[in-house]
Image (cartoon, grey):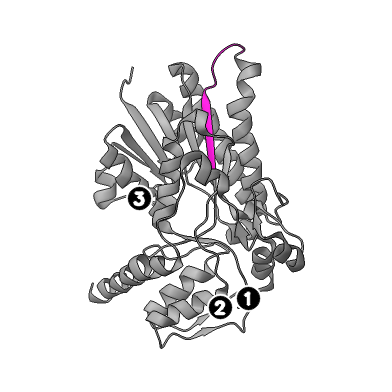
Amino acid sequence: METRTYVLITGANGEIGHGLIDAVRDQGQHGIIALDLREMTGSQAAHCDVVLTGDILDEKLIATLEQYNIDTIYHLAALLSTRSEQMPEMAHKVNVEGTMSLLQLAYRIGKRESRAVKFLFPSSIAAYGIPTLEQKQAAGAVKESEWNTPATMYGANKLYCEHVGRYYSDFYRRLADTNESGFVDFRCIRFPGLISAFTVPSGGTSDYAPEMLHFAAQGKPYKSFVREDSTISFMAMPDGVKALLGLAAAPANALSTRVYNVSAFAPSAAEIAAKVKESFPDAVIGFENVNQQRQGIVDSWPADIDDTKAREDWGWQPDYDMSRAFAEYLIPNITEYYRQAENA
């Protein structure tokens, strides 16, 4: 029987996945199992004990994971918001059925090892749904329990999986294993829009922010798909990794809920554009080609979110406000990223 414990990271080939691989490797407490649709190569693959290429909907592939003594699952794999609207049936399969499969895996391993398997789930501000702009403006910073009426398939998927994770942690054992300890420790973060210096945006409704940066860095004009006044919360990608690690490390008895907001800054699209132009003065950013479907989604999300519970329960504090995110993380790294691409 396998005695070493492992961390499983699905969607491991994304930037959050890469950051988690580096952090878990540095901690040195667990082996790393990486799973992604795309083949993982190079140094990231070398840092993992097991690298699997495949689909989280592949039952045989998931079954192979049961041989390992998995301590923690970071379930990052998902079909994002814009693509989920285009393919709602596939979104449900990936985002809901894939999550269910992994929760069952966690339960079986936890039961076998007589302990709880931590299950870290990145949810989204898409789990919120505010009907009108007037109500959005009046709502202010929204708490976890408010406006849980998502207007998208992606948001509905995420909100449902939050409830399913809570069920597996707090109720499922009472029916299946009376008088035994819980075998799943589900912990969820509702992320704002994440802005990366390295990952080119693909399929997220909040991608207008990173797209402005990546287009400007390449000297390409950008046509925003949202209005100038569009406002939601954002976070620099390193803080996304930090939040997941912080919640995973928190003692179970310190947590007052299974779902936590985290936030860092909440600029309008116009404020983001102005910040981009500070570093790329020749950047051309237009707001004349609004996509009404994507605009409607952004309008249904809170202008800001209240992350008081995360700050109080497990000491959440972002490293990057907007100014520092641009000055120390985004601009230097994006500039270097495209400089190297030109010289490759």
Residue 127 seen in render: yes
Label 3 secondary element = helix
Q: State the image quarter where residue 69 is shown.
A: top left
| N-terminal-most mark, 2 or 3 | 3
Name which residue lies at 41% across and 88% down. 282
Q: Which residue is mark 1?
A: 229
Badge 2 density bin: few <14, some 14–19, many ≥20, Cα 10 Å: some
Three-letter residue code for mark 3: Gly
What span is in magenta? Answer: 178-188
Three-letter residue code for mark 1: Asp
Question: In front: mark 2 or mark 3?
Answer: 2
Residue 174 horizontal/vertical position (percent): 64, 18
Name which residue lies at 61% across and 42% down. 96
Q: Quadrant of the C terminus?
A: bottom left
Badge 1 density bin: few <14, some 14–19, many ≥20, Cα 10 Å: few
Q: CA distance from mark 1 to mark 3?
A: 32 Å
Q: State the image quarter where residue 326 is shown.
A: bottom left
Residue 99 versus residue 29: which sits nearer the camera?
Answer: 29
